[in-house]
Amino acid sequence: MARHRSRVPESAAGRRLDAFVAELPEVGTRALAGRLVTGGAVLVDGEARPKSHRLAGGEALEVEIPAERALAPRELDLRVAYEDEHLLVVDKPAGIVMHPSGPEERATLAQGLLALGAAGGDRERPGIVHRLDRDTSGLLVVARSEEAYERLTEAIRERRVERRYLALVRGEPRSRTGRITAPIGRDRHDRTRHSLDTETPRDAVTWFEVRERLGERALLEVRLETGRTHQIRVHLEAIGLPVSGDPVYGVPRDLGLERQFLHAHRVRFDHPFTGVTVEVEAALPAELLAALEQARAKA
């Protein structure tokens, strides 16, 4: 843990506390600054203040800065589906974790993105504005600068980034389309799961449309309106349509699958700098395509 002590310059009068802290060399990002302020690691004249606190100039500033793991770029076999100077859209393979979460040395998506020029936000999650589970494949939008990160994060928060998935499920949908509105949070009995049975519910909305009926299975196109942890898998289980291959919420090893049949196949959004619509699609990976052909043959 490092400690920063300084005097707020008079020129900073009127500035937000989190914005000022973000410019400290030891901090560097608005996301980290916000976490430090909210967590009480930032003191102004010896007192914790909210992120929106306006500085007067001349105050004594003290910041406790955690010793963060150095994230080294690492070349990964990632398909770049779209890129420009501001952002990337990458096609994530299944089996790659998003960012470091322990002492293990395995490669993470964050390292691969760093090698592709990702930047902005958390130092350990550079450029990452939304997530995919480790064993979910498909498209991710990634920032290449702090400004791009802030604009894309705002677009995600305001639901201006359309994210569509393909999911193979077990069961027969009762309607061609549907909207699932059920709050999700960490399961009250099993802390490793998320569910509707929770003490910390957060609003969650998922849309689906049947693409193919395949006997005891169905291929769905799913659209996220919110982005809660494991949202699609939890919501589909809740309506009796568990995802094929899903070892936690669905049907483990269905059709020989080693992971859930869930693929982020399409993203659509207005570019945060140019306003031009960006629309990208990603084909099903080979193992999911093979499972889908099995389901078709069994139907």
Image (spheres, helix red, strand yellow):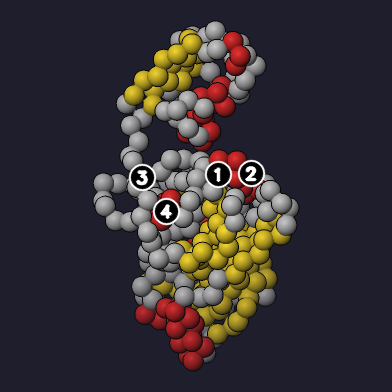
Residue 145 — which label? 1
Per the rendering, the mark at residue 115 is: 4
Q: Is residue 296 visible?
A: yes
- Residue 35 is situated, as x and y percent measured from the top left of the image, at 48, 31
User: Farthest residue in the front direction?
Assistant: 85
In primary-sequence order, the first of circles 2 and 4 is 4
Residue type pointed to by label 4: Ala
* Kind of residue sitting beneath label 2: Arg
Query: Is residue 224 shown above or below 9?
Result: below
The residue to which callout 3 is attached is: 71
For marks 2 and 3, give the CA distance: 24 Å
Circle 1: residue type: Ser
- Residue placed at 60% from the left, 82% from the top? 212
Residue at the spot 63% in from the left edge and 44% down from the top edge: 151
- Looking at the image, which is closer to me, 265 or 194? 265
Is the residue 249 above or below the residue 20 in the image?
below
SS of the residue under disc 4? helix
Mark 4 or mark 3: which comes first in sequence? 3
Q: Reading the chain from its start, which is encountered first: label 2 or label 3? A: 3
Q: Is residue 251 visible?
A: no
Relative to residue 116, is residue 158 drawn left or right?
A: right
* Residue found 55% across the figure and 12% down from its top: 9
Q: Circles 1 and 3: CB distance less than 8 Å?
A: no
Distance from the alpha carbon under mark 2 to that under mark 4: 22 Å
Question: Which residue is situated farthest in the bottom direction here?
Answer: 297
Secondary element type, mark 2: helix
